[in-house]
Amino acid sequence: MAIGNDKEFKAALAGLAVAKQRQVASRFAQRVFDLSNDVRVKAALEVAGRPEISDAELTVVSAAANTARVESFTQCGKETDWTAQAGLFVAKAAVACVGSPAPGSNLAWDAAMQARMARTCQTVATGEGTENREAEEQYRILDAFLNQ
Amino acid sequence: MNEMQFLTWVRGTGLNIALGIFLLGVLWRLIEIYSLGRKKDLSAPRNVAGASGWNTMFRRSLPPKDMGMVKKSPVSYIGGYTFHIGLGIIVFLFAPHIKTIQGLTGLSWPSLPSQFVDLVAVVTIAAMVVVLVDRINKPVKRYLSTFEDWFTWLVTFLPVLTGWLAVRHLLLPYTTMLAVHILTVEILLVVLPFTKLFHAFTLWGSRYYNGAVNGHKGVAV
Amino acid sequence: MSATMEKGVRVLKEVMDAPIASYLNSCVHCGLCAEACLFYTETGDPKYTPIHKIEPLRRLYSQEYTLLGRLMKMVGLSKPLTDAELGEWQELVYNSCTLCGRCSVVCPVGNDIVYMVRKLREGMSASGNAPVGIKGAANRTVTIGSPMGVKLPAVKAQMKHVEEDYGIPIPMDQEGAEYMVMLSSMEIINFPEYLGAIAKIMQQAGKTWTLCSTAFEATNAGMQIGNSDLARLIVSRIVDGAERLKVKTVISPECGHAYTALRWEGANLIGRPFTFQVKHIIEVLGEFQKSGLLKTEGFETDRLTFHDPCQLARRGGVIQQQRDLMNQVSKNFVEMPDAGFINWCCGGGGGASAIEEGEELRLEAFKKKKSQLEAVKPDRLVTACANCRIVLEEGLEHYQMDIPVVGLTEMIAEHIPEKGA
């Protein structure tokens, strides 16, 4: 049954084991990766996408992704470059992919949300406003992942 | 002019001139400063007990709570308290000074034993030397200091030193020493309203304003 | 003197009042203010002594408002202020001062030094001597309407994101709502979770609230740069919005200077008292807590400490509420040394974080915050100001300290059970 709304989407993600969540989360983030192009983010997404990951690897890419996140903040008072700001949310998505999940949290959902925010930044920057099809694309990705 | 004429002059004409300049100077400066006024604060106040201009006027005489300031600058606090309190005791609780004030205003009050005041004078002199040395040694104080800082230190120090020397009959013959002492006091009076020494009068207003602004926000400073 | 220098001098003359005159005449050069200022304590450079930062103000005051000073200027013993000098002072007045106010608390003669820095900024700005980083913010406020270039589409983007993530609708332009919620540019741009947290909290408390499409932003670059006209522009927008929507209370977000600008300077900028109340979100949460409207579940178990934003605590009078809120959701809340009213600044407030040339100095000043954290060794750091958050994260990153930073409102909201759960 195809996922058609966020309620179903969130529930389906919550039902996945952490390792699987990381994999699908990295796919959500990959869709918006071109809005960042940061090598640390790339490394994190690559690691998250693999079925077998060691804790040591996670720690390394996690730290690097966090640095990428901190570096992409816009300072108070500076002009906001929305294209660049998308990069912050891509980094946040990457951090969600490789972070240690707190009990009860849904890291894949977090990553999906951050990815959508990144897309929204891009469409705001290009003047297309807030309407975009990112959510629908994410449903498609999850469907494909669950059925593989 | 012989020593007696010198003493008579400083006790008479000199004192009149110095007091005149002092009183007019203080009045003028207070007007010059406070007539600028301040705008009313239209934001809604928070009323918290203990947070007000009046509270700060007195509370600020102590170091701020829990900030470790005395440890950071012990000479400023300990030396500062010592010489200020010392000056207060010497000026207002020494019998000959009270007599002088009585002669000018009619007011008088009990004095402290002269030997005690003598001890206070020595401690005050020592404290003043210590704060001077600190001003020379400490980078921040040295950086901030201008001619006025050294000058006002001297102008405040000399009356204490010369007064103590006079009482002890040291350095110069008594009549001359006393006359010099009174002269240094007159210089101090003339200089006070026009230098940082005027903080004696303005610190009350400053503390009040500071306390009021913060009290308006409910913060006791 | 150039046209802008003339304007600068005129503006400075206009800000002189009895308090400033009293302060300038009370200073005895004791240097205690330096010991309270993190830019001095962490660098050891006496030029960062707070009272020294306002030297141009002092000289102008002396030359224009004291008999002796005027005489000295006439005979050439005192030189008039020059544009070049103000340019030199830029670093001291902006890069090395976050308007944190610790200096004003320690001065033994009662000088409110931060007040004087704030006023000197008016002259600096009018004479064209404000830093490039903040000047841009000022220009954008005038031309775009937002210091950081945040426009309604961006807010709508956040609203959409939050509605999806939390499943709660975000009201906009609802007349008669009890609360009008403001956002800081920083939150709109960097921390969209804040809006979601508000939505959850308000829903649980059963309070009506709204955003305002013409006044969603609380960030006041005018206050930071020292341009009262600009500050007034931003405040007026908010006042118009609040009055149009007939709200009872305007909520200032997790941003320090926005609160100071609106709550304390706002009425004075527009020249009349407000017809509505202004509260910081932490104050509102505190009230909800006291009225039993904040029902949370569960506790954070890791070791938490709180960084008091200067403009909220020492300069704003909101000190206890954040502690009570922390204790509601944390079993292991420990105070850092010098917490609360006497907290040390993050080093990036007052526009400082927007000044690129000042970054090195800020990172050095951060050593003070670092020492506070090393003393308390928290697992995470909680605060209530979006700018503090970023400055803290950057500082921690620089010093390789692994301490995540979270916002208090967000943390509280995380403990509110899902509706219908």
Image (cartoon, helix red, strand yellow):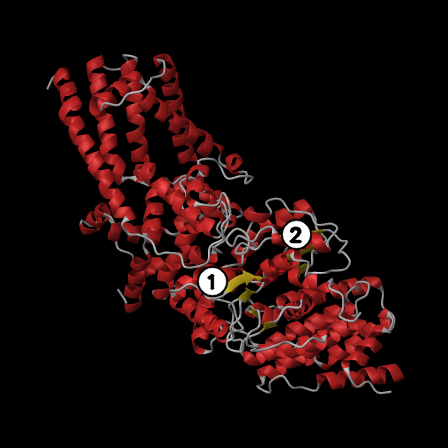
Q: Which residue position holds label 1?
A: C261
Please state the chain letter of the residue tagged with numbered disc 2 in the rendered image: C
The reply to whether residue C227 is visible in this rendering is: no
Q: Amino acid at mark 1?
A: Ala
Q: Work out whether residue A127 or residue B154 is closer to the camera in this orientation and state it.
A: A127
Label 2 – label 1 distance at C-alpha: 25 Å
Please state the chain letter of the residue tagged with numbered disc 1 in the rendered image: C
Whether the residues at callouts 2 and 1 have beta carbons within 8 Å, the answer is: no
Q: Nearer the viewer, mark 2 or mark 1?
A: 2
Q: Residues within 10 Å of mark 1 (few under 14, many from 20)?
A: many
The residue shown at (31%, 67%) is C4
Residue B124's spot in the image, x, y percent? 38, 23
Instruction: From the viewer's perspective, tell me whether residue C388 is left or right of residue C47.
Output: right
Residue C327's spot in the image, x, y percent? 70, 52
Q: Residues within 10 Å of mark 2 (few under 14, many from 20)?
A: some
SS state under label 2: helix
The reply to whether residue B49 is visible in this rendering is: yes
Picture quadrant of residue A110: bottom right
The residue shown at (74%, 49%) is C332
Q: Which residue position holds label 2?
A: C324
Q: Work out whether residue B85 or residue C75 is closer to the camera in this orientation and state it.
A: B85
Q: Amino acid at mark 2?
A: Asp
